[in-house]
Image: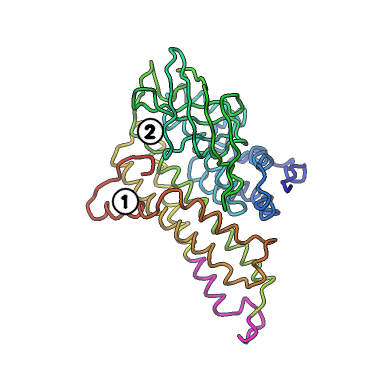
Amino acid sequence: MTTIDITPDTITADWTRPTSSAEWIARAHEVAAILSTDAAARDKAAATPTAEVALLKASGLATLLGPVEHGGGGQEWPTAYRVIRAVAAADGSIGQLLGYHYLWFWAARLVGTPEQIVAVETEATRNQWFFGGAVNPRDSDVVIRDEGDHLVFNGRKSFSTGSKVSDVTVLEGVLEGTDTHVFAIVPSAQPGITFHDDWDNIGQRLTESGSVTIAEVAVPWEQAAGFVDKTFQPRVYNTLNVPTIQLVFVNFYLGIARGALETTAEYTRTQSRSWLHGGYERAVDEPYVIDLYGDLASKLWAVEALADQVADEAVAIHRAADDVTEQQRGEHEVRVAAVKARATDVALEITSRILEGTGARSTTAELGFDRFWRNVRTHTLHDPVAYKRREVGVHLLTGELPEPTWYS
């Protein structure tokens, strides 16, 4: 079984905590360099990424969004997205795991009370919790019983990204006999949570995204996110989960695409042979090869720039969470929908066309260049991209904003 060997050679003594966004992004590239050394072999083995998550923790990336005073990075979402992109370029699965972890780490800010936000972020940062989530809206709701001073969760979810490598899991369900949804964070290792180890898809093979059964998991009422005296305290900001996770998707798609482009470009420079009837000595001099890489790189750079711009536009929203308006939220979601559509298209195109510039010998299983396409194709089916384009088109033509749902 192939795994990363976490030794002093891979976790170095000079990995002190970065202090700026640029330094954190550089740290992500250091982690990516380690992950890239055996990414194809680990993809083939599809082993539980325990060592990979240990690497994310040791490097400090796992606590990037945490408070500085408790050992975190104190960074904001634009930096987190760039970090996700860098890690995903080396290993799409680990990029996804890190992105989902950031979402669930931040979820306390999304729906929690001020006291809950402080408590969760303090404990999560100090203890380097790695988050998973059992919150698939396409499944039947988990049912929650009110037992007076605590809640009891029961149900099953077909996807639970992070599962066995998580320290804590975010649960979501509906109070029995009502339409009231409740989020709560619980320890992953407990008798009431069974991860079924049944994730066996063609791509994103190391994300531990299999099904989970939740049986009689008790949570004190005071840990029900956003509830005061059993009543939820709503804000428009509560609905920012969708545009935020969709930008997570955008950035690990773009990371995978960049990893594919850079990996195969290096192969073309050092291994590919020119076509025997083309009249060129080197593959890098072939006009069609030059055109291929120029075309794909131009498209990727354009969408990366748009992704960064949309992320920056959201900073003001996140900094003024109590004052977000429906108009601000809706306009941001339209922008996110636009970049999600473009990132999906460009990532699929790059990962499916890269072998045109590498040649027949590059299809060997040892190289595993197919993993880039398999990873993008698997996750881009999460929700139909046509509905993202519809959000943009409807808003452009009529001014209508997307109604907040689990997917918009």
Q: Amino acid at mark 1?
A: Glu
Q: Nearer the viewer, residue 6 or 363?
A: 363
Q: CA distance from mark 2 to mark 1?
A: 20 Å
**Please, is residue 302 above or below residue 98 in the view?**
below
Residue at the spot 52% in from the left edge and 41% down from the top edge: 100
- Label 1: which secondary element: helix
- Is 303 one of the magenta-colored residues? no
Determine whether, in the image, residue 200 is placed left or right of residue 9.
left
Q: Residue 278: say if magenta.
A: yes
Residue at 48% across / 66% down in the picture? 298
**13, 167: nearer the viewer:** 167
Q: Position of residue 368 (x, y in %)?
A: 65, 60
x 39%, y 18%: residue = 228
Q: Which mark is residue 238?
A: 2
Q: Position of residue 239 (x, y in %)?
A: 37, 36
Which class describes the residues within 10 Å of circle 1: few (<14), some (14-19), or many (20+)? many
Asked whether, in this view, residue 27 is left or right of residue 314, the answer is: right
- For label 1, the residue is 391
- The image quarter containing residue 360 is bottom right
- Tell me which segment is drawn in magenta: 275-298
Mark 2–mark 1 CB contact (< 8 Å) = no
- Measured as percent of width and height from the top left, residue 62 is found at 59, 38
Q: Badge 2: how crowded within 10 Å, few (<14), some, or many (20+)?
A: some
Which secondary structure class fits the magenta region best? helix
Q: Give the structural element (helix, strand or loop) at label 2.
A: helix
